[in-house]
Image (spheres, grey):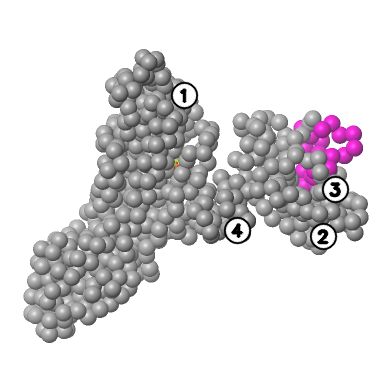
Amino acid sequence: MRASQLHLPTLREPPKDAETISHQYLVRAGYIRRVSAGIYSFLPLGVRSMEKVKRIVRDEMDKAGAQEVFLPAMVPAELWQESGRWQKYGPELLRVKDRKNADYCIGPTHEEVIVDLVRKDVRSYKQLPVNLYQIQTKFRDEIRPRAGLMRGREFIMKDAYSFDADQAGAHKSYKRMYEAYNAIFSRLGLRFRPVEADTGNIGGSMSHEFQVLADSGEDAIVACDRCDFAANVEKAPLQDLGFAAIDPAIGAARAVETPGAKSIEQVCKVLGCKPEAMIKAVLYMADDLPAVAFVRGDREANEVKVKQALGATAVYLAEAEWFAKATGLPPGYLGPLLPVGYDAKKVRFVADFEIKALASAVCGANEKQQHLVDVVPARDLANLSYADLRMAVQGDACPRCQPQGTLQSFKGIEVGHVFYLGQKYSKAMSATFLDEQGKEQVFEMGCYGIGITRILSAAIEQNHDARGIRWPVSIAPWECAVLGLGGEAPITETAANLYRDLQSAGVETVLDDRDERPGIKFADADLIGYPVQVIVGKRAGEGIVEVKLRHSGDKLELPVAGLAGRLGRAVAAARNGAPLTAADLG
Ligand code: ATP
Ligand code: MG
């Protein structure tokens, strides 16, 4: 393609609403244009990169035995009523009415539609297993669409759904998808980690998010520095390391005045103690009853774990006023030692395992303006109920290979999700088949999503510099740009010949034949992110050009003779997601 004919409107300035690098570059380099909040048009470059992502996803899905279908975006309400989600799904679900006043939604995900399809056509175990996928536009009316394609309202997803006769089969299907996802994200040239994720209301351990590692990511992950354990911080289980030994030198717990000191910081200031020696009370409403989770003063309580520990179905942070009224205890001065004679049925206490390991602690006294010091958990809090309640952090012991491994923190962008569903949807929608004995059975399901458009943002968050995008070869809109620095022979001739030869060698090439200054051509090429730039300048007459590799930054002077073949081989090798370096051009 000749740049002079390419619809390639690059901008000098980033759009005002773009805070993240990927959003800025996608707009500035002419990949996308905003139409409305979280809704974008794709320009030719954007389409090319997106199509490459789709091609890799399709290829690996097909290889894993999944088959492509295409489901409607408009979904009748009846299907969602059957699954129960018409009521449960919040305002993210865009509900619309047709001219006959019938209810529909624009599908944010397609479990209902696929279950309906499969229950009508699959009647026998002989037709199982089956795994169907589609690549399609989804709509979720996200409360805060942000960062361009990262969190759109309209976005493109690959969603697959597997149907098996039994659990063993479903686990096998899950494993195949897990492996296919590893292959997909490797081929996309991304640094990623599959991490164990929370399974929400479904339970079980079979859910993995595929996270692209990037500092700008929204998700907090911990991963072991020794073994392959990696999990969302909410999900990572932490262990009970037992009580600290009782130090006989520490006297009995006693109350001290701490007027006005309600927060951890204020108490530390008044008493000269450290947050890690404090017991923090986090107030909850658990199934409408007051409950308190005690964690170390420097830690964060994990609502998912608190809910589990309390065996509650719904847990919310409690309003201080409501809590005080319901328990008669003073928020801000709350501790695990209840006053003598207090009716313990009014409130539930649960403490994090880590509290046990404190030699001595400071906590609220359950009296206004007072705290307790010299609280020795092994001595004073032996009867408290303990559980794993907090978020994992950097430095925690790995729950899998402990005591050797240590957890490290990462930020991630969720680009894919594999989920074992069991019979959640098939049961609700009475989707059954006949087994070998002719008995009716409910399908075992899994669902598997990939954020096609989010991948473009994630790839840029991970691969950029101050000048622009540094695409992996596998998803760059074009693999190579030939920049002719001047309008006269031999520069123009060399550039045109190289352009022709590179195309013959199978390299997707753009010839920047625009009548622009070199500075502008360099800036655009770096911004757009062509993995290979061939710069035809002063030495063209001697048969020498410069080759610049955008990702590694390597620059080499190379003879024109044989260059197209060399680049053809190097680029072909990098299409599997491997980085392209100067060594590949040898
Ligand atoms: P998130 O926690 O980021 O909202 P999710 O858990 O709602 O994601 P899924 O329902 O598992 O996401 O959807 C599958 C994939 O679709 C996600 O892994 C993500 O890559 C992508 N995705 C989800 N929501 C959006 C969105 N609003 N914009 C772009 N991609 C999205
Ligand atoms: Mg979401």
For disc 4, the marked residue is 404
| 330 is within the stretch colored magenta | yes
**At which x and y percent is residue 102?**
35, 21
Q: Is residue 84 visible?
A: yes
Amino acid type assigned to the residue bearing label 4 in the image? Gln
Local crowd size for mark 3, using a 10 Å CA cut-off: few (<14), some (14–19), many (≥20)? some
**Ligand 1 neighbours mark 3 (CB distance < 8 Å):** no
Is label 4 or label 2 in front? 4
| Residue on which disc 3 sits | 379
- CA gap, disc 2 and disc 3: 25 Å
Q: Residue at x 23, y 66 (%)?
A: 570
Pointer 4 and pointer 2: residues touching (CB < 8 Å)?
A: no
Vertical relation: 20 (above or below) 129: below
- The residue tagged 1 is 84
Neighbour tally class for label 4: few under 14, some 14-19, many 20 plus, Cα within 10 Å: few
State which quadrant residue 490 falls in: bottom left
User: Is 49 inside the magenta-drawn segment?
Assistant: no
315 left or right, relative to 90: right
Residue at 22%, 61% in the rendered image: 572
